[in-house]
Amino acid sequence: MVEVVDVTGWIGDEHHAIFPVGARDKEMLWSPEKQVEVLKPSWPYLFKESIDRYQDQYWTELVAYIVSKYLGVDVPKVFPAIKNTEDGIVCGSLIEWFYDVDSERFVHAGSYFKRIIPDFDDKTGKQHNFADMNIFIRSLAIQAGLVTERVKWLADMALFDSLIGNTDRHQENWGVVFQSDDKSRLSPLFDNGTSLGHERFLDKVKDWDDNRLRAYVNRGCHHLRVNRENTKQRIKHFELVEGISSSGKDIQDYMLQKLDAVDLEAMLAEIEGLTKIDIDVPFSQERFEWIKRNILMRLELLKEEVRK
């Protein structure tokens, strides 16, 4: 069973004591020097709370991580965590940082977009777009020794974000890591909490039939736009998947293999196992059932989209 990590007493990062990017309260903390079985010693972790309105939202980070394992997509490790404060126990997700802060440098994609688009709106990210994203990644391959396979990374992003219904892959939720060997790699897919229907109150969706759920899923959009001029219309999740999968037979086969290889029974069993964790804000059976319905519907629609 997944263990709850108590981060009370962990040392805050002097540069990012309160992490500045995003809507939810976040703290960068350092794990203890003493070796703990599931944690890296003396390593930065992001402790991320839920939005007040959605007290159990922090679980979506962990569920998304479990989904990523079965889909074969690179996502930082996540643990449920608690912190004792003056106001009581705070629950949150604990996310393992994905680069060595002593020898590597991470740059958010937003820095690139703000450089090429002088009036880039970094609050709404409305000029965050697929065309410039693709150019940026191509330039890394030419100028910065990119070791990540560009098209496969894009395919992984599209599949993963569509499978979990992530609407918040904005320009600060991906980027590039510059390595100590003068090469670079694209970041794992981090910050996945705005997904899995977290915003839906369970009493409001308990009577939804498959048609209503399908309509909800089909309305879902990625944060990306097609190009910088089209600032109002986000790309729908399944349109993004279709666009990438139709770019060539090799990438279509790659995406189909990913989807067909998902061990659905094992994945859902691991997610349901989270309901057994004893914590102040638990992952309820009702929340699991809602997430399960979402995943089953999305996986079916994704397979249909890629096979077109």
Image (tube, grey):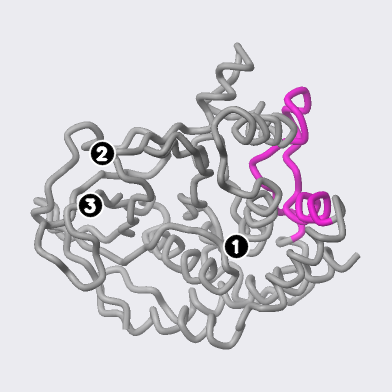
Q: Residue at x 55, y 80 (%)?
A: 289
Q: What are the residue bounds of the magenta stretch?
A: 218-245
Q: Which residue is mark 2?
A: 102
Q: Residue at x 17, y 64 (%)?
A: 6
Q: Which residue is mark 1?
A: 164
Q: Earlier in the sequence, mark 3 or mark 2?
A: 3
Circles 3 and 2: CB distance less than 8 Å? Answer: no
Q: Which residue is mark 3?
A: 43
Q: CA distance from mark 2 to mark 1?
A: 33 Å
Image-quadrant location for residue 2? bottom left
Q: CA distance from mark 1 to mark 3?
A: 28 Å
Is residue 173 located in the magenta-colored stretch of the structure? no
Is residue 223 located in the magenta-colored stretch of the structure? yes
Q: Residues within 10 Å of mark 2 (few under 14, many from 20)?
A: few
Residue at the top extreme, as displayed = 118
Q: For this view, does 260 lie left or right of residue 195?
A: right
Image-quadrant location for residue 137? top right
Q: Secondary structure at mark 1?
A: helix
Residue at the right extreme, as displayed = 308
Q: For this view, does 87 lie left or right of residue 121?
A: left
Q: CA distance from mark 3 to mark 2?
A: 11 Å
Q: For this view, does 194 lie left or right of residue 25?
A: right
